[in-house]
Image: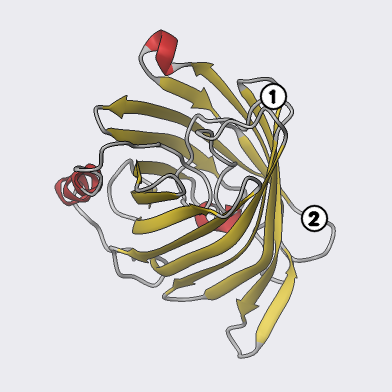
Amino acid sequence: MKPMLSRLSISRFWLAVPMLCVGVQTALAQGGPPMLTDDPGTPGNRAWEINAAYFEQHTGQEHTRSFPHVDFNYGLGEHIQLKYETGWVFADAPAGGVKSGLDDSLLGLKWRFLDQDRHGLDMSVYPQLQVENSTGSAERGIALPGPNLFLPIEVAREIGSVKLVGEVGYQYFRTQQNEWVVGLLGAVQASEALELMAEVRSFSEKFLNGGDLILNIGLRQRLNKRFKLLASVGTGLNHGPETTSFIAYLGIQLVLGEDHQDNASSAAHASRLFQR
């Protein structure tokens, strides 16, 4: 049985995230890799954001790694983002040894329908469909049986020197219990090239009540005009056989296209981090 965490305890962790961002003069809210929480940003018209990464996740029952983990994000106009994501997964077998194979494919379409300069905040919807590849990975326990559907909504707003991002969605699984997914992220621009981020992310069958609660910190370091270093590390705040004890992400982002928006996010984080 998963340990329960009260709503009050969860709210205290959520209030701590904005406090990590206070005291910095400028802020740039941006979700997506290397973080778990996505935001309403899109790459920009005909622009690409391509992420290649290593990521790792531990729970009380399993240890998984994905390398390379890739996601491709394309801006169709200024308000729409198309995304494809997959990876090569390594999973520790219960009887010992390691199983590996191609992960499921994750397809997404983000539509930002509100902009802060006109409406006071940015808001988007981002449906994502996870489907099995024809490699037998689901039958071998490496990937989740599909199809699975994630239906989130994202909100972002600048408040003085701090920018906050919120995401709320419902995850429909084919073979396991559906769950609520909620994230709150704060971001600050520490320098012209360095962005620092912190978030809390909740996965629970009941809304914000029990389940898997994760605290995650990360950074984006601009290396040059086309490349960024992405890194994050996190820990679970609940303890149980199915809850996260450790996560990490390390990758490179390639930006292509003259219309790329620097304050736009990449597509969602590694799919297995929220579609477990």
Question: Which residue is rendered at x = 62% and y = 48% of the image?
Answer: 174
User: Which image quadrant is residue 235 in?
Assistant: bottom left
Q: Please state if 37 lies on the left or on the right of 135 as rendered.
A: left
In what element is the residue under mark 1? Answer: loop
Q: In the drawing, what numbered circle is on residue 133? A: 2
- Labels 1, 2: front one: 1
Q: Residue furthest right?
A: 134
Q: Quadrant of the N terminus?
A: bottom left
Mark 1 sits on what residue?
45
Look at the picture and state if 144 lies above or below 29: below
Count residues near mark 2 (Cα–Cα under 10 Å), then give few for <14, some for 14-19, many for 20+. some
Task: Examine the rendering and report whether any part of residue 111 can be seen.
Answer: yes
Q: Please state if 236 lies on the left or on the right of 226 as rendered.
A: left
Q: Position of residue 2 (x, y in %)?
A: 33, 63
Q: Residue furthest bottom?
A: 96
Task: Please state which of residues 188 and 83 is positioned toward the viewer in this rendering.
Answer: 188
| Upstream in sequence: badge 1 or badge 2 | 1
Q: CA distance from mark 1 to mark 2?
A: 29 Å
Question: Which residue is rendered at x = 72% and y = 75% of the image?
Answer: 100
Q: Hey, what amino acid is under mark 2?
A: Asn
